[in-house]
């Protein structure tokens, strides 16, 4: 039996268009496919490329990198740059430099540069938050920035019903009963569990035999662009929620998702 979809949404046309694009980014973009294309290898081969020993290092390395990056990124406002350069160009330059270092020295280099590239990425996410009207002096904004790392993929314990955008937000909300809990190990661990998947593809692509310093920089820039786009979509949803109400935005999001499924069927 076919499902009857609402003809109109509880949002103005401009807000509906913004939400539709945000939903597409949050639900339909594939970092794995992009990394596989850059490394010149199938996705499954890229998934299996990292050795078991490297996989074992990822969890603790990612947790430490996320905690360190959040402290460093929020120490100075990411929407301001002392150099006079546009902040997006500054962040892209730093990401390219750290990626080049990782690509030049293979897998050990990519693991060593992870704290640097993660801090750069979080600053870019913070800049997107500021552009959407978020208060960077609010500790909860830091938590929302960190949540973007979880939007790139499901954690190992997630099932198919727990991987959508709002489901991920709900799963992470349990770790933030108050503002002072933003850096609790449980919260960082939940973020890390979801960030490891996309990060594994990035590290595998940078560790590919054909990848050197230049290609390593390109991989880092693609990784930065992917999460920057996710951040823009996430903070667009939050801005629309502040303007039109969380309930109306959630309802419209679900209708847009149903329309997309209907069109794909």
Image (tube, grey):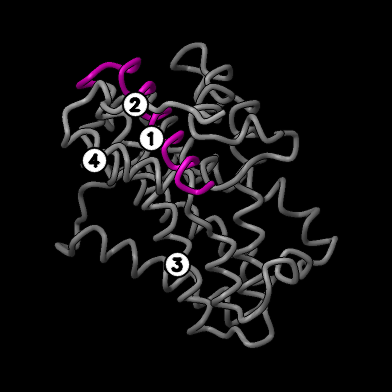
Residue placed under numbered mark 1 in the picture: 256
Asked if the residue at tag 1 contacts the one at tag 2, i.e. Cβ–Cβ closer than 8 Å, the answer is yes
For the residues labelled 1 and 4, the Cα–Cα distance comes to 10 Å
Badge 3 or badge 1: first in the primary sequence: 3
Which circle, 3 or 1, is nearer the viewer?
1
Which circle, 3 or 2, is nearer the viewer?
2
Q: Looking at this view, name the residue that lies furthest to the top.
A: 177
The vertical placement of 109 against 52, above or below, is below
Could you tell me which residue is drawn at 44 percent across and 36 percent down? 257
Residue placed under numbered mark 4 in the picture: 17
Q: In the rendering, at what x and y percent does residue 104 appear?
A: 58, 82
Q: In the rendering, at what x and y percent does residue 108 appear?
A: 69, 71
Residue nearest the viewer, comparing 234 with 208: 234
The vertical placement of 153 against 175, above or below, is below
User: Looking at the magenta stretch, what is its main secondary structure?
Assistant: helix
Q: Which residues are magenta?
A: 242-265
Badge 4 or badge 3: first in the primary sequence: 4
Left or right of 53 on screen, residue 147: left
Asked if the residue at tag 4 contacts the one at tag 2, i.e. Cβ–Cβ closer than 8 Å, the answer is no
In the rendered image, the quadrant that contains the N terminus is top right
Residue nearest the viewer, comparing 116 with 151: 151
For the residues labelled 2 and 4, the Cα–Cα distance comes to 11 Å
Give residue 222's mark. Answer: 3
Could you tell me which residue is drawn at 71 percent across and 46 percent down? 60
Disc 2: CA contacts within 10 A as few (<14), some (14-19) or many (>=20) = many
For the residues labelled 3 and 2, the Cα–Cα distance comes to 30 Å
């Amino acid at each position: 039996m076919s499902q009857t979809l609402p003809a109109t949404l509880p949002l103005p046309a401009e807000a509906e268009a913004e939400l539709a694009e945000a939903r597409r980014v949050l639900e339909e973009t594939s970092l794995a496919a992009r990394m596989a294309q850059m490394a010149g290898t199938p996705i499954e081969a890229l998934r299996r490329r990292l050795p078991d020993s490297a996989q074992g290092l990822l969890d603790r390395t990612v947790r430490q990198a996320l905690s360190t990056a959040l402290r460093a990124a929020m120490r100075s406002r990411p929407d301001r740059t002392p150099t006079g350069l546009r902040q997006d160009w500054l962040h892209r330059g730093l990401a390219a430099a750290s990626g080049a270092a990782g690509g030049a020295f293979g897998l050990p280099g990519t693991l060593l540069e992870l704290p640097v590239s993660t801090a750069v990425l979080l600053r870019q996410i913070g800049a997107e938050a500021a552009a959407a009207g978020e208060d960077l002096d609010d500790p909860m904004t830091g938590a929302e920035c960190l949540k973007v790392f979880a939007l790139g993929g499901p954690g190992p314990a997630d099932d198919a019903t727990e991987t959508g955008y709002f489901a991920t937000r709900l799963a992470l909300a349990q770790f933030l009963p108050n503002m002072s809990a933003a850096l609790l190990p449980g919260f960082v661990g939940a973020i890390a569990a979801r960030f490891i998947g996309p990060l594994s593809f990035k590290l595998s692509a940078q560790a590919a035999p054909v990848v050197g310093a230049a290609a390593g920089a390109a991989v880092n820039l693609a990784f930065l662009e992917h999460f920057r786009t996710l951040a823009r979509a996430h903070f667009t949803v939050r801005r629309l929620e502040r303007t039109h109400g969380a309930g109306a935005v959630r309802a419209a999001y679900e209708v847009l998702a149903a329309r997309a499924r209907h069109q794909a069927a």
